[in-house]
Structure formats: C-alpha cells, structure tokens
Image: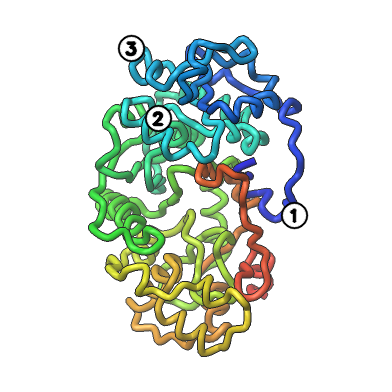
Amino acid sequence: MYCLPLSFIYKIKKVIAVDYNNYEFYFNGFLGKKIVIWANKNSLPTLEKYKFLLNKIHYIVVVEKELWGKKFYGIPIIGPQEIVLNKNKDRFVVLNLIKEYWKSATNFLYKYGVYQVAPLNLFQSMAPYTKQIEDIQTTSPKNNRKLENDVAIVVRGMFDPFFTPLVLKQIRINYPNHYVVLSTWDDTPSKLLKNIYADHIILNKKPEYKGKGHRNYQIQCVTSALEFLKKDNFKEIFIQRTDQMFFRNKLIDRCKLLLEEYPNNIGYLKNRIITSNLYFRKYYLYNSSDLFMYGNIDDLLCYWEAPFDARSVEEIPNFHQIVENRNIQKSDLVDFYRNEESVESYLFKNMMMKFNYEFKYTLEEWLHLASNLFIIRDTQWWDVFWYKPSLFNGTIQNFKEGHPLELIDQLDWEDMQI
C-alpha cells in the first residue's frame, strides 16, 4: 500500500504481505471510461498479482516500441501517443503501475490534456473506503440547496485532477447547505474547473518564494479564502486540503459542540482551534498541526496571516539533522526553536507575536499553550483519508517515536484538561 488511511497510522508496525486478489474492486465510477495501465517491459509480470482486474483493463501502455501491438493476458499493448493523440482521450483513466514513473507520466499526460491519472496501488490503500468513494462517483448531489449557514468550508491547495473533484463532490453531498470555497492556483487548467462542486473559486498567483515546506504557498492559499469569507460575514470555517476526504458523520456539528464544551479561558483567541494530532509535536516546541482545522474565522486568520518567508532552505536549521543522533543539548533546541524550522511552528509563533507574546522556550510553557488554545482529536476521530501519490512506495512514518518527535495525542490533551 502506498498510503494508508490515517486512522490506521498507529496500528501498522511492519509491512504486511498483501493478497491483492482478496480485495473487492469497485469500478462503477469509471463506467464509460477506458481503463489503461501505465507500465513498462520489466513491470508487466507485476500485473499478474492484479489478476482480478485484468478483465477490466482496455490497454497497457509501455514505452518500449518492440512491445507495441502485442498482448499481455489478451490486453493490447500500446504506446503513450495512442492516448494523448486520441480524439476521445477524455474517456481514458490511466492507472500508473510504477512508482518511479509517477511524476514523468503525469507531467506527460497533463501536457496533452489527459487528467484522469491515479496510482494503481491507490485501490489497495483506500480499500476501507472504496465503496463510499464509488458512491460519491455515482451519486448526484441534490439541487435544492439552502445556503443559510454561517459555517463555510475551505478546500485549499493544488488541484488534483483525479481526486479533488471527488473531494468537492463529497462535501456537496454531505454538507449541501454549507458554502464551499476552492482556493487553488492560477495555473490550474480551466478545463478542470468546469462543473465542479464549489460555490466560489479563488485562483491564486504563486508567491515568488515558496518558502521551506511550501509555507508561503500555504499562507497564500488559506488567507485569500479566509479574507474572502470574512467579507461575507461567515463565522466559523472548516479548512481542509484538496487531497483529503473525511468520512466522520456530521463532522462540522461535532466540531461546533467541541467549541462549546471547551471554551478558551486564557485569551489571545476568541475560541480554541480544533485540529488533529498529526504533526502536533510534544517536544518540538510550538509545532501545532495545520493539516486541517475548524474554528472561528478571526482566530484562523490570526493563525494563518503570516508574512511570507524569503529565507532560503540553507538559512533555516534542519531539525532532522539536529536531532539525528538524539544526543542534543537544550541549548541546541532553543536555538532551533528561535528560527522556526517547520511550517507549523512558523505559523504558530507569528500568531503569538501579534499579541506581543514573550516565548520562554520551555516544555511546560508549550504544553500550557497547546492544551488551552487548541482542541486535539486523533486522526481516527476525524476518519480521514489522505490521498498521497507521492507516497506511492508504501512508506509511511510511524509518528509514535520517542523524544523529540512524539506527538500530543487526544489522550494527552484530555489529561491536560483535568
């Protein structure tokens, strides 16, 4: 599997052999499409483990000319040009078999307007959700919408041609009365933005410097959407990425109840900000999680409105090198914390500096701020699937490491409330 549902992130301790033929495969969402496997000569034997889907494949694409015109298990083998030059290329869905080909294959296909591309391994990693995603593909959202809600949803980041339309469609199905803003980039092909389920689309110009960890890109994408919604008097916002899909029932209602249950008693913000435990680190001071958030729009603007960071990668300390041997001194970490290596700590520290806050650089101080300014819920609580083709090789870190990478999880946070 290349990317597990986040709800499984702590359960996987080792790589488990996968019997691909035991997975139930759903293709109803691809009705009317021609399924293509993108492979090469050496990878063809790998397809044998996908025998259960061979009768659903129309073509196999390889770059080796000597194989063009031949067949594999009765499936015609063709060259890449037969897809990109086909007058009906919109009908193709390309499933990439080889992790090393992901970037080059997608760049080639996107160049010629073939956008329905996904890793073949995707269907194993999303096995717990395949039926729900098939339902999303085949369901038509209701037209009788009533936009009478002061909560809006921001979907931010790069537009993935395969997955982002499904994300937006799922939101429209589950939250028909909520206003949805897609905040993406101005180089997104206009063809992809037709007939998607978003009430407003913001096409951002990319900042001159992306910043380490793409921090400037994230700041631009989120703040442009929040500023737009602020003008329309929305009160609370759910912010998620374009590659995330949430399956928790009535998620927004649950978030509203959490804000009522846990008021902010230390000031700075109007309310607490609800987020996940993923990347919310305990010993990496001021490293809150920003993958997805729910909160008051003013609080979220306070968090996300930070100046663009023009420093080069070389000018920012590399945290992973500092802690690599774990033989680190407190002075090393304090020096590191002052330079905000991570995107998360950069955003959090800029937020607190708006209140002229004086950082103490102690664990006690950080845990106090984390426990009182945020509400932390584990990824299982959110029931979120994160579509990550970049993790095509099955690598996913175990974040339950010891000091200094350990997370503040939901139980930790709840213990802090007593």
Asked which quadrant contains residue 220, the reply is: bottom left
Where residue 287 sits: x, y (%)? 50, 70
Whether residue 233 can be seen here = no
Mark closer to the chain start, 3 or 1: 1
Residue at point 67%, 64% (across, down): 400
Look at the numbered disc 2 and give the secondary structure of its residue: loop
* Residue linked to disc 1: 13
The quadrant of the picture occupied by the C terminus is bottom right
Along the line of sight, which residue is nearer the eye, 349 or 100? 100
Could you tell me how far apart the alpha carbons at marks 2 and 1 are, in whole angstroms? 45 Å
Where residue 238 sits: x, y (%)? 44, 50
Asked which quadrant contains residue 355, the reply is: bottom left
Give the amino acid type for the residue marked by disc 1 in the picture: Lys
Q: Is residue 345 left or right of residue 195?
A: right
Q: Which mark is residue 87?
A: 3
Of all residues shown, which one is farthest toward the front?
66
Look at the numbered disc 1 and give the secondary structure of its residue: loop
Where residue 310 sits: x, y (%)? 27, 68
Where residue 139 sits: x, y (%)? 51, 22
Along the line of sight, which residue is nearer the eye, 130 or 328? 328
Give the amino acid type for the residue marked by disc 2 in the picture: Arg
Q: Is residue 311 left or right of residue 35?
A: left
* Residue linked to disc 2: 145
Quick one: label 2, few (<14), some, or many (20+) residues within 10 Å? few
